[in-house]
Image: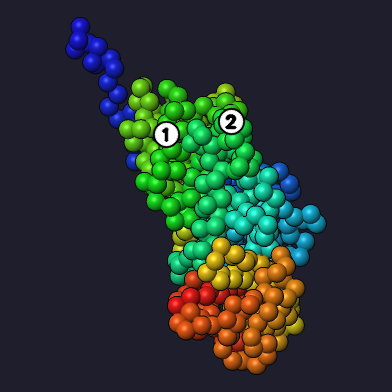
């Protein structure tokens, strides 16, 4: 009887999704996402849940956006068309919100487009910086919409430079990391609304989807997977695991919630098919996702009872099964003549451009803004950036600079003067900081970071 009971309680062998099953899921999932491309090469749809999130899933599955073209017409490849859409003055709309730019950063990066160098007049990183909340440092957009801050951190931490480096200073990421930590609920998870400072809100139950996104944002922001906040989030998700391998989400068992949760685990280096995420029947969240996929079509259902695939669920499902967080490093295109990256390399004289500026004086008074200037050549100078920052968004990023003209060394900024070994230094796109001079050359798309210290 004891032996029989042991056999009945044991996890079935090979119950988790196998490498071959995952490989098949990736291949067929890509086939389905390719079928969503419009005849003009576009993935961006009007309103709602845009199919442009497909770029994150395609990259995760090893397919370059530049290789996706309707009927093989490379003049309409998905990367080229998407870049043109992002560069248009009409994008994203007449009433944009912060998540428009965050979505654009995550997906342009996955598509192999430098998000800070979409075109001479489009820098998505600077566009996001304009939503920095001076009164509530660490938040992007209205703090009540906590979702905007989570995806801001995901975008700035996840979209690396073309050489694979971190494009923004760690101090900027740390500010939002602290904000995400402050919004973690007592049960270890998060939801879309702000909870920081509100005991009632912090005591409310968390959401599967937002927990996956928030924990991913912490990890791409530099928090290790062993951190107490990540462990608490992991335990929250573990407690929501059903026998089918799905997570019991706020809106019931579904592919999107499962995909976000798995992407959160992926981003933090936590195995979604490990012991903690294997149910008593031997099923894992990846098992559930693979089971939601139509065969051989490759699309994913939203609900287990659905009889047709959902584009949005297919993106979330494939990206998670492929092992990614909320974006992915773009694979090199295989189409002849297509470069690894699409990027504009220089300013266009007379065309207004935006740059992201971060000013860190060594205190908690971090300043972040988007600076708009009209260059006279293909490059500009730090002096010109500082002068233009007088009218930056949000305001107050730069209130004074010494010297105020010429190309000399910056000796004081915002009332903080060089003293002994503590001086103002400048770093561009995460490169090693050097002495800040007004003559320092600044290129299109550079994230300009000024820091005070030794």
Foreground pick, 147 / 244: 147
Is residue 397 visible in the rendered structure shown here?
Answer: yes
The reply, left or right, for residue 412 in relation to residue 58 is right
Q: Position of residue 284 (x, y in %)?
A: 40, 31
Q: Say how many tags the image has.
A: 2
Compare residues 83 and 428 and report the one nearer the observer: 428
Name which quarter of the figure residue 290 lies in. Answer: top left
Residue 213 higher or lower than 385, as above or below? above
Query: Which numbered disc, 1 or 2, marks the residue that appears first in the sequence?
Result: 2
Q: Which element carries disc 1, helix, strand or loop?
A: helix
> If the image is split into quadrants, where does the C terminus sit?
bottom left
Q: Position of residue 156 (x, y in %)?
A: 55, 60
Residue linked to disc 1: 235
Q: Is residue 67 above or below residue 300?
A: below
Marks 1 and 2 sit apart, C-alpha to C-alpha, by: 16 Å
Q: Residue furthest top?
A: 1
Which residue is depicted at the point 77% across and 61% down? 90
Residue annotated with mark 2: 204
Give how far across and how far down residue 27 sits, in percent.
Answer: 45, 45
């Amino acid at each position: 009887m004891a032996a029989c009971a042991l056999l009945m309680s044991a996890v079935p062998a090979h119950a988790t999704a196998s490498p071959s099953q995952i490989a098949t899921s990736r291949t067929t999932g890509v086939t389905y996402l390719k079928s969503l491309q419009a005849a003009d090469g576009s993935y961006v749809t009007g309103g709602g849940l845009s199919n442009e999130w497909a770029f994150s899933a395609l990259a995760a599955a090893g397919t370059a956006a530049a290789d996706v073209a309707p009927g093989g017409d490379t003049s309409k490849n998905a990367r080229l068309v998407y870049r043109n859409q992002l560069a248009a003055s009409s994008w994203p709309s007449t009433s944009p919100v912060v998540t428009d730019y965050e979505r654009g950063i995550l997906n342009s990066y996955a598509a192999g487009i430098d998000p800070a160098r979409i075109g001479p007049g489009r820098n998505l990183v600077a566009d996001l910086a304009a939503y920095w909340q001076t009164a509530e440092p660490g938040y992007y957009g209205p703090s009540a919409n906590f979702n905007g801050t989570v995806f801001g951190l995901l975008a700035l931490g996840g979209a690396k430079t073309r050489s694979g480096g971190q494009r923004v200073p760690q101090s900027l990421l740390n500010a939002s990391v602290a904000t995400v930590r402050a919004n973690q609920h007592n049960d270890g998870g998060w939801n879309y609304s702000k909870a920081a400072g509100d005991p009632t809100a912090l005591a409310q139950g968390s959401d599967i989807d937002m927990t996956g996104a928030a924990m991913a944002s912490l990890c791409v922001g530099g928090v290790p997977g062993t951190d107490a906040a990540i462990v608490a989030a992991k335990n929250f998700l573990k407690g929501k695991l059903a026998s089918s391998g799905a997570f019991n989400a706020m809106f019931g068992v579904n592919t999107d919630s499962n995909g976000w949760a798995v992407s959160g685990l992926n981003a933090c280096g936590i195995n979604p098919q490990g012991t903690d995420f294997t149910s008593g029947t031997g099923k894992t969240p990846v098992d559930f996702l693979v089971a939601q996929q139509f065969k051989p079509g490759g699309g994913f259902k939203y609900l287990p009872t659905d009889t047709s695939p959902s584009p949005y669920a297919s993106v979330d499902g494939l990206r998670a099964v492929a092992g990614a967080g909320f974006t992915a490093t773009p694979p090199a295109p295989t189409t002849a003549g297509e470069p690894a990256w699409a990027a504009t390399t220089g300013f266009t004289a007379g065309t207004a451009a935006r740059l992201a500026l971060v000013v860190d004086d060594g205190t908690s008074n971090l300043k972040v803004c988007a600076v708009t200037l009209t260059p006279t050549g293909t490059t500009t100078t730090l002096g010109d950036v500082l002068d233009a920052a007088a009218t930056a968004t949000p305001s107050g990023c730069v209130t004074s600079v010494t010297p105020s003209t010429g190309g000399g060394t910056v000796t004081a900024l915002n009332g903080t003067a060089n003293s002994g070994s503590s001086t103002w230094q400048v770093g561009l796109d995460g490169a090693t900081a050097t002495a800040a001079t007004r003559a320092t050359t600044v290129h299109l798309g550079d994230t300009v970071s000024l820091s005070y210290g030794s």
